[in-house]
């Protein structure tokens, strides 16, 4: 078995009282039982807990077969979705592919370029995307669990029309893949009516916990990522984090420590990385924790930073600003490439003290230096060490953070599986757009907007 990720909070010992940590054991035990009981209090929301060890071989083969077909008939693959129906696959593809994947020559890449839509309502973005896709052979995967989310629905309408004009109705049908609820929603109905190939999102797996279903796995497979290794990484994490005992479970310790820090007024957690490839992983993580914990007037605000880039922007605040922060740092022990600093005869740039070192060594010193500096500055630093950046590690990480999120939500006393707050903006937007059924709200919102207009 490859090495698992490791959780290390030694740099934060001074902020954490081990006795208080151990006092959380009974609550952790309860949270663990609740997560593992498919008929318990979270009935209908915990399918993701066992998913990596219960993944149907049939579904895997279906995903891989569709991926091969898409690869064979496309230069470009368009993934349409938002939130949990988008961030996980993007995180995986950015983490595990070449940094400039879409720019590689087609014969080096050997898999289609991947583009994303449905994650905004920008006509500029969609116009430019249509321009880019104009002369390419395209397939698309529209992903929406509810099947009614406005942003992906708009993008799908635009690109479905684009495909039908390009290939005709039957030709488009051969290139449209739909990932949605197994029985409900407008998208499911449309897919069945049009005869598109469909993938079902299990009922008991919510959007932000769905990356290890076809939601994430089909786009990953199309991009050439070894999805079996992703699932193996998640399955090994499932076993590693299946004991309710805090002292033996890194995942539960992370969940508990962030709650202890929250009680000390550390209300913002920054997920830090030292590899640009991890940028989007943090976007996925922010949705997971933001929607799961930010409710009932509670919750740690999940933020992210890319280091060393942001050490030169946000570094000042982190070191010296308001002391309501803690950091969780993702550090990859091994780099996939090696680049050395050469020697310069004139040493005009005064960098010869670094000659003969590789960039990973220098990146590590930046990481070690920042962890110490920020801890000294009153910002607890928790470290998640990745042995390397690989599909297996991606699976580990996803499972580690998902499970920790389920435990952490319970410790905080919230329901980590709903997102009632997201509906408020949708309600207002629908009313303002004149969607049938929202007439009353429209009148009152318009009055408020008019009264706030300058004379
Ligand atoms: O997959 P769907 O139903 O389109 O939802 C997309 C995203 O929108 C939300 O429902 C919130 O707007 C998220 O929870 C979800 O991940």
Image: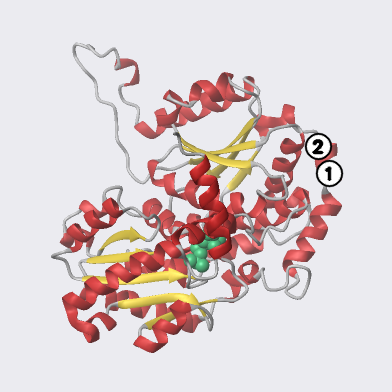
Left or right relative to 71: residue 443: right
Percent across and percent down for residue 385 are 54, 43
| Residue 121 in sight from this viewpoint | yes
Q: Front-most of 230 and 180?
A: 180
Decide if ligand 1 comes within 8 Å of the CB at mark 2.
Answer: no
- Outermost residue, front side: 455
Q: Which mark is residue 222?
A: none
Pointer 1 with pointer 2, Cβ within 8 A: yes
Decide if ligand 1 comes within 8 Å of the CB at mark 1.
Answer: no
Determine which residue is flagged by label 2. 18
Q: Quadrant of residue 421?
A: bottom right
Quadrant into which the C terminus falls: top left
Q: Residue at x 18, y 76 (%)?
A: 165
Left or right relative to 81: residue 445: right
Q: Residues within 10 Å of mark 2 (few under 14, many from 20)?
A: few
- Outermost residue, left side: 135
Percent across and percent down for residue 235 are 58, 66
Left or right relative to 241: residue 138: left
SS class of the residue under badge 1?
A: helix
Percent across and percent down for residue 244 are 77, 58
Q: Residue at x 51, y 39 (%)?
A: 452
- The answer to whether 129 is drawn above or below residue 175 in the figure is above
Q: Residue at x 45, y 48 (%)?
A: 388
Q: Residue at x 40, y 82 (%)?
A: 190
Percent across and percent down for residue 148 are 48, 70
| Residue 228 in sight from this viewpoint | no
Quadrant into which the N terminus falls: bottom right
Determine which residue is flagged by label 1. 22
- The answer to whether 194 is drawn above or below residue 75 in the figure is below
- The answer to whether 320 is drawn above or below residue 105 in the figure is above
Q: Front-most of 301 and 452?
A: 452
């Amino acid at each position: 078995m490859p090495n698992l990720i490791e959780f290390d909070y030694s740099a934060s010992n001074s902020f954490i009282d081990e006795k208080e940590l151990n006092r959380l054991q009974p609550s952790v035990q309860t949270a663990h039982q609740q997560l593992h009981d498919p008929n318990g209090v979270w009935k209908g929301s915990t399918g993701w807990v066992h998913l990596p060890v219960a993944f149907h071989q049939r579904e895997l083969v279906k995903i891989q077969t569709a991926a091969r077909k898409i690869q064979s008939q496309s230069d470009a693959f368009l993934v349409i979705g938002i939130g949990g129906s988008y961030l996980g696959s993007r995180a995986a593809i950015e983490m595990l592919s070449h940094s400039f994947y879409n720019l590689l020559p087609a014969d080096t890449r050997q898999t289609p370029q991947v583009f994303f839509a449905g994650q905004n309502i920008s006509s500029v973005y969609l116009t430019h995307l249509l321009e880019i896709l104009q002369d390419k052979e395209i397939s698309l995967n529209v992903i929406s669990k509810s099947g009614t989310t406005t942003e992906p629905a708009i993008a799908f309408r635009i690109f479905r029309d684009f495909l039908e004009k390009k290939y005709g109705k039957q030709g488009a049908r051969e290139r449209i893949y739909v990932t949605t609820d197994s029985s409900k929603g407008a998208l499911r109905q449309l897919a069945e009516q049009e005869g598109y190939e469909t993938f079902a999102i299990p009922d008991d797996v919510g959007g932000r916990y769905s990356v290890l279903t076809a939601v994430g796995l089909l786009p990953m497979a199309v991009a050439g990522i070894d999805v079996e290794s992703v699932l193996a990484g998640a399955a090994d994490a499932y076993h590693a984090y299946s004991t309710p005992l805090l002292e033996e479970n890194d995942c539960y310790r992370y969940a508990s420590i962030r709650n202890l820090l929250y009680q000390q007024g550390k209300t913002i957690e920054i997920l830090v990385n030292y590899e640009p490839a991890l940028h989007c992983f943090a976007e996925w993580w922010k949705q997971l924790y933001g929607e799961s914990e930010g409710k009932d007037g509670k919750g740690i605000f999940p933020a992210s930073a890319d280091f060393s880039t942001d050490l030169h922007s946000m570094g000042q605040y982190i070191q010296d600003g308001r002391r309501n922060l803690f950091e969780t740092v993702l550090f990859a022990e091994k780099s996939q490439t090696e680049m050395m600093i050469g020697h310069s005869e004139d040493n005009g740039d005064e960098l010869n003290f670094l000659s003969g070192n590789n960039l990973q060594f220098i990146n590590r010193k930046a990481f070690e230096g920042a962890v110490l500096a920020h801890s000294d500055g009153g910002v607890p630093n928790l470290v998640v060490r990745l042995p390397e950046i690989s599909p297996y590690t991606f699976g580990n990480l996803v499972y580690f953070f998902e499970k920790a999120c389920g435990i952490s939500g319970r410790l905080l006393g919230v329901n980590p599986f709903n997102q009632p707050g997201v509906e408020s903006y949708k309600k207002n937007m629908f009313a303002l757009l004149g969607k049938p059924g929202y007439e009353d709200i429209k009148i009152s919102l318009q009055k408020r907007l008019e009264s706030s207009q300058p004379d």
